Structure formats: structure tokens, C-alpha cells
């Protein structure tokens, strides 16, 4: 209680005291480290300036590659870093607040034609990814965008649904469909390590959920890939989220508190001790509704409860390299009841749903010499879900209808060698071993036998071996190529995949860049598909009926052009074709099942790798980067997504929406202030429209006779949901005072209250077909304070 009292007193004084302090110009420190991107060596003597400052404000990096700019005015500033023989770097429109220092990790690339670098050109290259091996179908995103874009609600998955070729979930989850692929093809990575689905309220095989367990305040700039991935990325064929945690402030203690209708969270960071460059960063979050429920403020069934914790410890050493320890953990549960309106709101079903995840990892980077370094990672993770379901029968009694407990543990050890041969050539090679331990038990009620039937009962383990090599060659400062391969070997059934990759980028002139890419990619099917059990040869025996499934694969072809219209605006066009093969489909004649249409639930059929798929389309992006407080992002995608089973007929996939458009724009206004306060008002809006997803029609007569839902499987995905139209709005009000920043934000999703039909299901109690509709208008109020 004493600690809590001191914290409350400290926060209160921090808010109140600035009102009594005399007027002063608000400023902050901008500092960081500049390194060679290829060798990780410090860049000594680099020039660091504030663009447009008059008189010029700048400094140079010291022997450790570090720099420090004091008394930088609060607001938006652009930082340029130049060094003879290296390509310029610019960080445009960084948000400088009075509460927190701005700390940059700058990576510079050595130029092939060094003499050309005498002339300084401050051109924005905001779309460039952090991974220099990614030349196509890639996009960097920032924490600023995650918090600024309307409709994102500080969630990276919701934010990227504004990008070309990506659609979200109209029903409310953060699952994303990338170029017509199932959300199951998305891979999440944290600090370079593949991790389980980092969302609350999820189950095995899913990649999305209603709430992301990773708070965006923990993130550094990160990458998102939508096709033809660089050779280092394996076990993915749709898209890759490559997220990075930022380092904590290693110079001073900082604290942030945030509260909104979703959750309450605290972030603390600071140095371990004086004159040591290490730092810590922690964030803890707790469900707002769970807190109100515990206090007795709310009292209704189905209160979603969750909590999560994330952290990063940066631990540099003088001679043993740099270590970083990171982690993410979360638990969530909800006890939901389904009431039937036609039966006077009688509870007919109840479900106790629990899920959890945990990740801890250790990264080590060791500089071998001036041109080479070794990066090693060890990580452990756990994710699981438990669902208990009860259903009311005709005798008005409840019986157990679902009993599922799926738990998976994963250990990973990987290492990669990075070698800068010369200014033209860089080589990467890596080896990764992943071992899976799983304990899966899943039973569902069988209406014919009138008892729970075991679909999976397995306690087993298996391994995945991955290796890759990647070579980048720069012919000159305009033309570069990346080539290599990725290999996967699955020990469970000895299946493997050899995946060549190649991409090119040609910067014709400062305005025009052409690029092309090709790659073969594969991903494990969900573990539950491999572990599906059926009758064996002996009486009463059960065996894995899908153990021999090969890895589903895809060939990606990409061609594009990026045109810089001016210093702040570009137009990007990208066309693609994806050829999917070895896709798991139903083995029985007449089956129309394909894993390309699945989201999270697992199949109980016997499967074979005879399926095909194809996705093709064109994507357009017109973007003005934030400049003078104004930005916009307009995207349009037109595509087709089809699949084929053993009847050789091409059909629309579930995710063939055919088109997706987005229009975002925002404006920041610096308000006139008096004294020691600076106020900023922000307006952001988003209009999105995309084609409805497909679903298989319900046979109402057969469903009534069977007492459960029966689909017309001979007409797969022939029914279509409504096209979705949604308008989101975000208003922000930021107040900077000495050493303190406060933020008040109102986000309203679906302000037009769109009501599109998403899908349908059979209600066995009313014996009617019911609709699943678009999530209605959702307001989210947010308050944050940093000091």
C-alpha cells in the first residue's frame, strides 16, 4: 500500500506542479547510435542535423557511433544523418514530446560509388524496410502510424489492413486476409523469432483475435511482408509480421500510464546503473472490464478478462557481444452464455473459454571482425486453449457438448552468419531448429451416438529443421539483386521443401524504381491436421490419418514500379501471381474441402496433397507521408483467389472478395498556447470498402431433420456476404508540459454503423438460418500520461 500511495502521489504532483512553474520553451533530447547496417560496426564522425533548422543544429557521432542533440523543440522534426561514402539516412517528422527522449538506432549502407555521396540529398525513403534483403512486396511501419491511423486502435494487425492487398475481419477480429490467402498463412515474428499467435482469446491454428497481447508502446519500427519473401523467412506462404521491441532508455527513468475502454497499462523503462549502456523496458496491461467486474461495477455474463506482460532487457558487454532478453505473456478467459430469444432468453448453451501464451527469448550478437558478425537466438514458447461447452437438451438438462484442451510448447535454437564481403556483396547464412511438444485432447458431442467422440488425443513431439543462405549483390547504387534459398525438413513425416528465391531492384533515377521477385514458400499445416485420428486396422485402435501430409507450397511472382511524385508523395503499383500446390484437400471422391478456406477450426477428414490454388491481382498505393502536419494514404486492390480439389473444378475461395479500397487522411494542428504548455489537435479518418467473403449455403431442411447445421457441400462458397463499407474516425488532443505529456484520444470504428452480412449459421433452437453481421459502431476512449 505504501508503494501504491507513493506512485499515486508522484503522478499527482507531476500533473499539478507544471501549472505553477514559470513559462519556458519546451524541449527534449534526441540521441542515438549510428552503425554500418552490413557489419554492425559503429560509424564514427557521421553528421547528424535537424533538417530545416536555422541556424543549423547538429552534431557528429563519437568513437562509439553515438550522438546527442540537446534542447530540440517539442513538435515534429526531421533528422538527417550523412557520412562520406554512405547513403544518407533521414528520419522524417519524428514526434518529439516533453516527457520522453527520442532514441534512434540508425543503420547506414555503404555506397558503391562513394564520390556520388558528396552531395547531400534529403529524400524520404519511408517505405524502405529494415531488412535490406527485402526488395519487393514489403513495407516498414512505425509505432506512430499504429497509434495515428484511424481504426487501428494501437493494433499493428488492424493498422496494416489499410495497406494495399489486405482486408480485415468485418465481424470484429484482427485476422487479416493478404492477397486472397487464408489468415492461417500469416506468420508472427518478434525480435527475429517466430512466435505463437500474439492475441488474446485464440485457439490452435488461428493467427488473429479480438485483442493483441503485445502493446504497441513496446514496439520499434518493424516490417510487414506480403509476398516473395527474402530467403531468411521460412514456414510462411501468405505474409510475415516481423516486429521489433525497442530498447528502454539507458540514460534516464521514464514512466507511462494509459487507460482506455480495452485495458489499463503501465510502461516503465530506464538504465540499470550509471555509466552502463544497458536498459530495461516493461509493460503490464489488465482488462478494464475485468477490473470493473471485480469491483462489482458491471454485472453481466460474458465479461472478457485478460492480462499481459511484455519486456526487453538490453545487456551490452565490453567483449562478449550484445545480449538481449525479451518476453511476452498473456492469459484470457470468458464465460459466455447463448440465449435464445424465441424461448424468452433461455440460456441454451454456455462456454468457458480460456487461452494463454508465453514467449521468452535470448538474442546474442557477436562481432567477429570488422566485416562479420554472428547472431544467435534461443527461445521457448507456450500457447494453449481450453474450452468447456454445455448444451441444454429437450428435457431441459445440460449435457457436455465440447471438451477441448490443446497445449503446445516450442523450443527454438538458431544462428546466422552475416558477412560483408565488400561494398557490393553481402552474404547471410543461417540454421534454425524448432522442436514442438504438444498435448492435444479434443472431444465433441456426436449426435448419432449421443456421446462425446474423441477427435484428437495425442501427447507427442516433432521437429522442424530450417536452413537458408542469402546473397545481395549491388551492381551499382541503382541496381541490386538478392538471391538465395530456404530449406525446410519436417521430422514428423520426413517431408521437405527446397525453396529458391530471387529479387531485383532498379532505381532508374531519383523518381522511378522498378522491382521484381520470385520465390517458393511453404508452411506447415496446423498441427491438429497432422494429429487428426481415425480407426486403425485393429479393433478399437486409432491412428494418425493425415500423418503423411506434405508441406503446402506456393510460388510467388511479383512485378512493380514505385514513382516518387515529390519529396513527400509516391505512387506504387504492384502486380502478382501466386501458384499454390501440394494443398491439403479431402481424400474422398466428391469432397470439396481445401485447407485454403480454413481460418482456425481443424478438419476431421482424411487429407491428401492434391489440391491447387491461385491468387493474382494488382495493387495501387498513393501515399503522402506526414509533412507539415498532413498525410494521406489511398490504396486499391483488385484480385482473384481460386482453388481446386480432386474434381478439377476451379472455384472461388472463401476469401475471394475481389476488391479492397482504403482512403486515410489526417491533419495535426498546433494550437496557440500560453506559458509552458504546447497543445496539438489531431484529426484522422479512414474510409474502407471491400468485397464480402464467400460461404457455403445452409441446407435448412436437412439441418432441421438432423438437428444440427448441414451445409450444401456440393455448392462450396457459392454464397456471398455483403460488400463492406466502413468509416472510422480518430480525434487526438496532446498536451506537452515540462517533463510531462498527456494524450486524450477518441476512436470511433464504423461511425456510419455499417451492417453488412458477413456469414450465416443454423440456429437449431429456432430452426432458422441466422445472420452474422458487421461489428456495429464501436467507440474507444483513450487517455495516456508520460513522464
Image (cartoon, grey):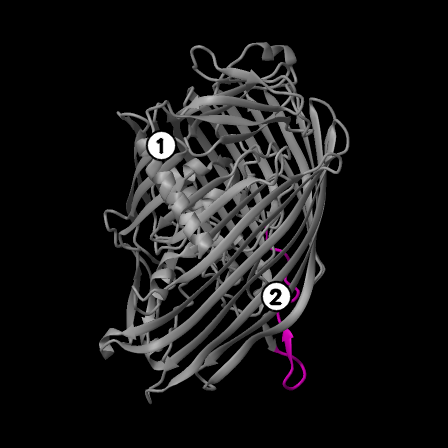
Rendered view: 614 above or below 442: above
Rendered view: 514 above or below 636: above
Answer yes or no: do the residues labelled 2 and 1 have beta carbons within 8 Å? no
Left or right: 379 with respect to 613?
right
Left or right: 435 with respect to 703?
right
Provide the secondary structure element on which disc 1 rests: strand
Position of residue 744 measured from the top left corner of the image (x, y, whole percent): 31, 41
Furthest residue toward front: 2
Rendered view: 676 above or below 409: above
Provide the secondary structure element on which disc 2 rests: helix
Q: Is residue 765 shown to the viewer in this render? A: no
Q: Magenta span covers which residues?
A: 535-553
- Rendered-image quadrant of the N terminus: bottom left
Question: Does the segment drawn in magenta span residue 540?
Answer: yes
- Rendered-image quadrant of the C terminus: top left
Rendered view: 668 above or below 598: above
Label 2 belongs to which residue?
530
Residue 26 placement: quadrant: top left
Q: Nearer the viewer, mark 2 or mark 1?
A: 1
Furthest residue toward bottom: 395
The local crowd at label 1, few if under 14, some if 14 to 19, many if 20 or more residues have their Cα within 10 Å, is many
Residue 634 placement: quadrant: top left
Position of residue 215 measured from the top left corner of the image (x, y, whole percent): 46, 47
Position of residue 62 measured from the top left corner of the image (x, y, whole percent): 63, 20
Image mark for residue 736: 1
Q: Nearer the viewer, residue 267 or 413?
A: 267
For the point 55% across and 48% down, which residue is it?
A: 311
Furthest residue toward right: 369
Q: Is residue 707 shown to the viewer in this render? A: yes
Q: Earlier in the sequence, mark 2 or mark 1?
A: 2
Position of residue 296 measured from the top left corner of the image (x, y, whole percent): 31, 67
Amino acid at each position: 500500500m505504501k508503494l501504491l500511495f507513493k506512485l499515486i502521489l508522484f503522478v499527482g504532483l507531476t500533473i499539478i506542479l507544471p501549472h505553477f512553474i514559470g513559462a519556458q520553451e519546451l524541449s527534449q533530447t534526441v540521441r542515438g547510435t549510428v552503425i554500418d547496417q552490413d557489419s554492425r560496426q559503429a560509424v564514427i564522425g557521421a553528421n547528424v542535423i535537424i533538417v530545416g533548422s536555422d541556424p543549423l543544429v547538429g552534431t557528429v557521432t563519437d568513437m562509439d557511433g553515438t550522438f546527442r542533440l540537446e534542447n530540440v523543440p517539442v513538435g515534429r522534426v526531421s533528422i538527417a544523418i550523412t557520412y562520406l561514402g554512405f547513403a544518407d539516412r533521414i528520419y522524417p517528422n519524428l514526434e518529439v514530446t516533453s516527457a520522453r527522449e527520442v532514441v534512434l538506432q540508425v543503420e547506414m549502407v555503404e555506397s558503391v560509388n562513394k564520390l556520388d555521396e558528396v552531395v547531400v540529398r534529403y529524400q524520404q525513403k519511408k517505405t524502405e524496410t529494415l531488412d535490406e534483403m527485402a526488395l519487393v512486396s514489403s513495407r516498414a511501419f512505425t509505432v506512430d502510424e499504429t497509434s495515428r491511423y484511424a481504426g487501428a486502435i494501437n493494433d499493428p494487425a488492424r493498422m496494416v489492413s489499410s495497406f494495399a492487398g489486405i482486408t480485415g475481419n468485418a465481424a470484429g477480429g484482427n485476422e487479416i486476409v493478404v492477397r486472397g490467402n487464408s489468415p492461417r498463412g500469416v506468420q508472427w515474428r518478434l525480435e527475429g523469432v517466430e512466435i505463437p499467435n500474439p492475441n488474446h482469446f485464440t485457439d490452435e491454428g488461428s493467427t488473429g483475435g479480438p485483442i493483441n497481447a503485445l502493446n504497441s508502446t513496446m514496439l520499434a519500427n518493424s516490417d510487414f511482408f506480403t509476398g516473395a519473401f527474402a530467403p531468411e523467412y521460412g514456414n510462411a506462404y501468405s505474409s510475415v509480421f516481423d516486429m521489433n521491441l525497442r530498447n528502454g532508455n539507458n540514460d534516464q527513468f521514464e514512466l507511462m500510464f494509459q487507460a482506455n475502454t480495452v485495458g489499463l497499462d503501465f510502461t516503465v523503462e530506464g538504465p540499470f546503473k550509471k555509466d552502463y549502456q544497458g536498459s530495461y523496458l516493461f509493460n503490464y496491461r489488465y482488462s478494464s472490464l475485468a477490473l470493473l467486474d471485480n469491483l462489482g461495477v458491471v454485472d453481466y455474463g460474458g465479461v472478457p478478462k485478460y492480462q499481459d506482460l511484455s519486456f526487453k532487457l538490453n545487456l551490452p558487454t565490453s567483449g562478449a557481444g550484445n545480449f538481449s532478453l525479451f518476453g511476452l505473456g498473456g492469459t484470457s478467459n470468458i464465460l459466455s452464455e447463448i440465449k435464445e430469444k424465441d424461448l424468452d432468453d433461455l440460456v441454451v448453451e454456455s462456454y468457458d473459454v480460456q487461452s494463454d501464451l508465453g514467449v521468452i527469448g535470448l538474442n546474442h550478437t557477436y562481432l567477429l571482425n570488422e566485416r562479420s558478425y554472428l547472431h544467435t537466438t534461443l527461445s521457448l514458447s507456450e500457447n494453449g486453449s481450453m474450452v468447456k461447452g454445455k448444451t441444454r437438451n429437450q428435457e431441459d438438462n445440460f449435457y457436455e457438448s465440447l471438451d477441448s484442451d490443446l497445449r503446445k510448447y516450442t523450443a527454438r535454437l538458431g544462428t546466422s552468419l552475416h558477412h560483408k564481403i565488400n561494398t557490393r556483396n553481402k552474404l547471410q547464412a543461417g540454421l534454425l531448429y524448432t522442436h514442438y511438444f504438444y498435448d492435444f485432447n479434443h472431444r465433441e458431442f456426436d449426435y448419432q451416438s449421443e456421446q462425446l467422440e474423441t477427435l484428437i488425443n495425442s501427447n507427442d513431439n516433432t521437429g522442424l529443421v530450417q536452413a537458408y543462405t542469402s546473397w545481395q549483390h549491388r551492381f551499382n547504387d541503382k541496381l541490386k539483386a538478392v538471391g538465395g534459398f530456404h530449406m525446410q525438413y519436417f521430422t514428423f513425416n520426413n517431408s521437405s521443401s527446397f525453396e529458391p528465391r530471387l529479387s531485383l531492384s532498379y532505381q532508374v533515377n531519383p523518381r522511378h524504381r522498378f522491382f521484381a521477385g520470385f520465390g517458393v514458400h511453404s508452411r506447415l499445416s496446423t498441427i491438429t491436421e497432422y494429429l487428426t485420428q481415425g480407426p486403425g486396422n485393429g479393433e478399437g485402435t486409432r491412428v494418425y490419418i493425415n500423418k503423411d501430409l506434405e508441406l503446402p507450397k506456393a510460388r510467388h511472382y511479383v512485378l512493380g514500379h514505385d514513382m516518387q511524385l515529390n519529396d513527400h508523395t509516391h505512387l506504387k503499383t504492384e502486380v502478382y501471381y501466386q501458384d499454390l500446390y501440394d494443398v491439403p484437400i479431402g481424400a474422398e471422391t466428391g469432397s470439396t474441402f481445401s485447407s485454403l478456406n480454413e481460418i482456425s477450426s481443424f478438419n476431421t477428414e482424411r487429407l491428401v496433397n492434391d489440391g491447387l490454388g491461385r491468387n493474382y491481382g494488382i495493387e495501387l498505393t498513393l501515399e503522402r507521408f506526414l509533412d507539415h502536419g498532413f498525410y494521406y494514404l489511398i490504396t486499391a486492390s483488385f484480385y482473384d483467389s481460386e482453388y481446386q480439389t480432386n474434381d478439377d473444378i476451379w472455384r472461388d475461395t472463401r476469401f475471394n472478395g475481389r476488391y479492397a479500397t482504403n482512403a486515410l487522411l489526417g491533419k495535426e494542428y498546433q494550437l496557440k498556447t500560453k506559458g509552458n504548455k504546447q497543445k496539438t489537435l489531431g484529426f484522422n479518418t479512414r474510409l474502407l470498402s471491400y468485397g464480402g467473403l464467400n460461404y457455403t449455403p445452409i441446407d435448412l431442411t436437412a439441418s432441421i431433420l438432423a438437428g444440427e447445421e448441414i451445409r450444401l457441400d456440393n455448392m462450396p462458397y457459392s454464397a456471398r456476404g455483403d460488400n463492406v463499407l466502413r468509416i472510422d474516425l480518430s480525434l487526438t488532443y496532446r498536451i506537452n508540459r515540462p517533463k510531462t505529456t498527456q494524450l486524450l484520444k477518441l476512436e470511433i470504428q464504423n461511425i456510419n454503423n455499417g451492417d453488412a452480412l458477413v456469414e450465416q449459421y443454423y440456429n437449431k433452437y429456432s430452426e432458422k438460418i441466422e445472420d452474422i453481421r458487421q461489428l456495429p459502431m464501436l467507440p474507444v476512449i483513450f487517455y495516456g500520461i508520460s513522464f
